[in-house]
Image (cartoon, rainbow, N blue to C red):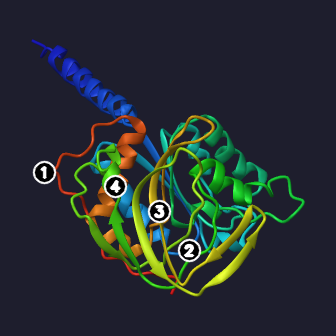
Amino acid sequence: MKKKSVPLILFLVGISFLIGHRGFAENLKPHAVLVAGTLHYSPELTLPVFAKELERFGFRTTVVVGEGDPEKKTENVLPGIEALGSADVAIFFMRFLKLPDEEWQPIEDYIKSGKPVIGLRTANHSFKYPKGHDRFEWNDGFGRRVIGTPYIVHQSSVTQISVVEKHLKHPIMTHVDTANWESLGTLYLTRLEAGCIPLVSGTGTGKGRLLERSFGTTLVNESEADIVAWAWENEWGGKVFGSTLGHPGDFAEESFTRMLVNSACWAVGKPLPRSDQAISTWDIKRADK
């Protein structure tokens, strides 16, 4: 008498269903694309570990990082940047890039789609196209129009950080319990666009000087205070979390990494981490110095 094979068939069908269901569930997770487009401040080290943290909180992630120094390249600068086409949130940490058309286009398409943007540290001066280039305006425009401020200048000391008490109820500040800390990064000065909500401020010292830029004149004092993290909605309707923090030392501070996780969740409408959920930190040294 032949053995019945129906149970085996049902078993195999069940396994196929589970595998398919797992793949379907994975695709339902919001897709975060993290773009490391500089060696300055070592985002090629910090963004991959932060991507793993986002995965722990229910994201699927793609890290875009090329070989060599992206600031010195004009071809194959950001291989895989087309991943932005399926992104639900993009985290940009770039500086002084001159992308070819085929690598620029996914970025422009993403921005103009109105999807969320998180810009860290040098992202407000992501591009450095020569005068006369079709994308010259984006040298300042990416910071100003996409993230909320152009690059002005930075100070030379460490930065003393303070939360902005008035906006502690903003979702990005949820369970950020430390009111003051020190960032190893220098203070970047900003010129925030109207509607930016200041979340965190910083103070730092440096050389007093007069700066004359294409977008205006700035008198920099020896001691300066400025906003170092903010929330905004840009002209395309995209949610924005902008921050001039992002030195590798900042990733050792739980308040910063919690804000970063919160901002990604806020951007895509995911529940924010609970107060009893630990947020990872990392001791990462700058590789560019």
- For the residue marked with disc 2, what is the amino acid? Leu
In three-dimensional space, the C-alpha distance between marks 4 and 1, rounded to whole angstroms, equals 15 Å
Q: Earlier in the sequence, mark 4 or mark 2?
A: 2
Q: Amino acid at mark 1?
A: Asp
Which of label 2 and label 3 is nearer to you? 3
Q: Which of the marked residues, 2 or 1, is nearer the chain's N terminus? A: 2
Q: Quadrant of the N terminus?
A: top left
Q: Which residue is mark 4?
A: 259
Residue picked out by circle 3 = 227
Give amino acid for label 4: Met
Q: In the rendered structure, find residue 39 and report the number of the disc placed on it.
A: 2
Q: Are marks 2 and 3 in contact (CB under 8 Å)?
A: no
Query: Reading the chain from its start, which is encountered first: label 4 or label 3?
Result: 3
Q: CA distance from mark 2 to mark 3?
A: 24 Å
**Residue at figure coordinates x 63%, y 38% from the top left:** 235
| CA gap, disc 1 and disc 3 | 28 Å
Q: Where residue 13 sits in the image (x, y, percent)?
A: 26, 21
In whole angstroms, how far apart are the C-alphas of marks 4 and 3? 15 Å
Residue count near mark 3 (Cα–Cα under 10 Å), binned few <14, some 14–19, many ≥20: many
Q: Which mark is residue 276?
A: 1
Instruction: Using residue 62 as the reference point, say whether residue 284 is left or right of it.
Output: left
